Image (cartoon, helix red, strand yellow):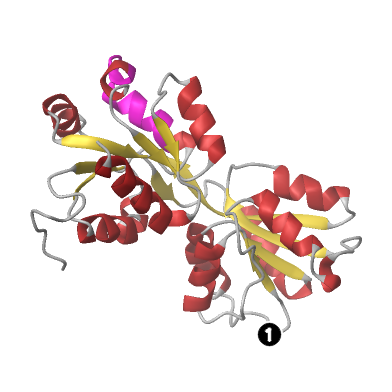
């Protein structure tokens, strides 16, 4: 473990990490490496799908698909776990990932190299990347398996269907509020100044945080910078009244770098 020193860029700065605990490790480690004091308070839980039938139906047809798209590292973990209960991954089935982090998760799971955008971490960037590849410029008639949560943006599926593809959802997890989350230590940390930065990786994560902190959450968080990984989440946060929101598109490394930059001028 990296030891904190007084001259580390984020020494003495508490950073609230709201990601699900099973996803927070790399961010917590990256913050600690810069001397920060990461405070974990998961406001989102990753749960099994309420209805497993759509996932099982999709897995029944997986070998007939032309492409499998994974929407997130969470989809990789839960989707592959479900797929591998049926046997090995179909050898002729290529994979695509919404971003580099998801592609790394697929590589770590020993799947073939995933097609993914080299810039950006969202559906729009993946669509543009696929459109740049000769083999994927014509989607008409393609059978596409989309590993994702039970809910989420429809942008990717709608765009692929508009091009004539047949998109099959394989919902392999769902997001929910943690059943037990005591906000008292977080409220104290925000009030006393121990927590000087907040991170949120989705609009739902932020909304759950505000709900868990209670009626005074907006007033309490307004003076504290909020770091998010996408312009869409930043817009949502500002609409909720959190003006000091910093968009850090580019994954964990970029988000931590932006926190370091912010406090270098604090």
Q: Position of residue 58 (x, y in %)?
A: 69, 62
Q: Position of residue 79 (x, y in %)?
A: 55, 64
The residue positioned 33% from the left and 46% from the top of the image is 261
The residue at the far left in this view is: 6
150 or 2: nearer the viewer? 2
Residue that label 1 marks: 91
Quadrant in which the C terminus is drawn = top left
121 or 187: nearer the viewer? 121
How many numbered markers are drawn? 1
> Does dot 1 land on a helix, a strand or a loop?
loop
Residue 223 picture quarter: top left
Say whether residue 36 is visible.
yes
32 or 110: nearer the viewer? 32
Q: Which residues are magenta?
A: 205-218
Residues packed near mark 1 inside 10 Å, few (<14), some (14 to 19) or many (20 plus): few
Q: Main secondary structure of the magenta part?
A: helix
Residue 213 in the magenta stretch? The answer is yes
Say whether residue 181 is visible.
no
Quadrant in which the N terminus is drawn = bottom left
Q: Is residue 156 above or below residue 81?
A: above
Residue 136 in the magenta stretch? The answer is no
The residue positioned 84% from the left and 73% from the top of the image is 135
Q: Is residue 8 left or right of residue 122?
A: left
């Amino acid at each position: 473990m990296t030891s904190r020193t007084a001259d580390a860029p984020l020494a003495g700065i508490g950073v609230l990490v709201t990601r699900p605990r099973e996803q927070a490790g790399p961010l917590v480690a990256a913050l600690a490496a810069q001397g920060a004091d990461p405070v974990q308070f998961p406001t989102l839980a990753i749960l099994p799908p309420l209805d497993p039938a759509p996932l099982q139906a999709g897995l029944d047809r997986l070998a007939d698909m032309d492409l499998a798209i994974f929407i997130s590292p969470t989809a990789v973990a839960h989707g592959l776990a479900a797929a591998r209960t049926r046997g090995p991954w179909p050898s002729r089935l290529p994979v695509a990932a919404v971003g580099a982090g998801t592609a790394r998760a697929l590589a770590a799971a020993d799947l073939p190299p995933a097609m993914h955008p080299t810039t950006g971490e969202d559906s729009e960037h993946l669509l543009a990347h696929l459109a740049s590849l000769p083999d994927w410029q014509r989607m008409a008639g393609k059978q596409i398996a989309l590993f994702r949560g039970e809910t989420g943006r429809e942008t990717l599926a709608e765009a692929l269907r508009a091009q004539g593809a047949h998109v099959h959802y394989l919902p392999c997890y769902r997001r929910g509020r943690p059943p037990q989350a005591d906000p008292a230590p977080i409220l104290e940390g925000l009030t006393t100044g121990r927590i000087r930065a907040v991170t949120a990786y989705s609009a739902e994560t932020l909304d759950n945080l505000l709900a868990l902190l209670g009626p005074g959450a907006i007033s309490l968080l307004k003076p504290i910078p909020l770091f998010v990984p996408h312009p869409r989440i930043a817009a949502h946060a500002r609409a909720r009244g959190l003006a000091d929101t910093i968009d850090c598109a580019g994954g964990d490394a970029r988000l931590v770098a932006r926190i370091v930059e912010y406090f270098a001028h604090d």
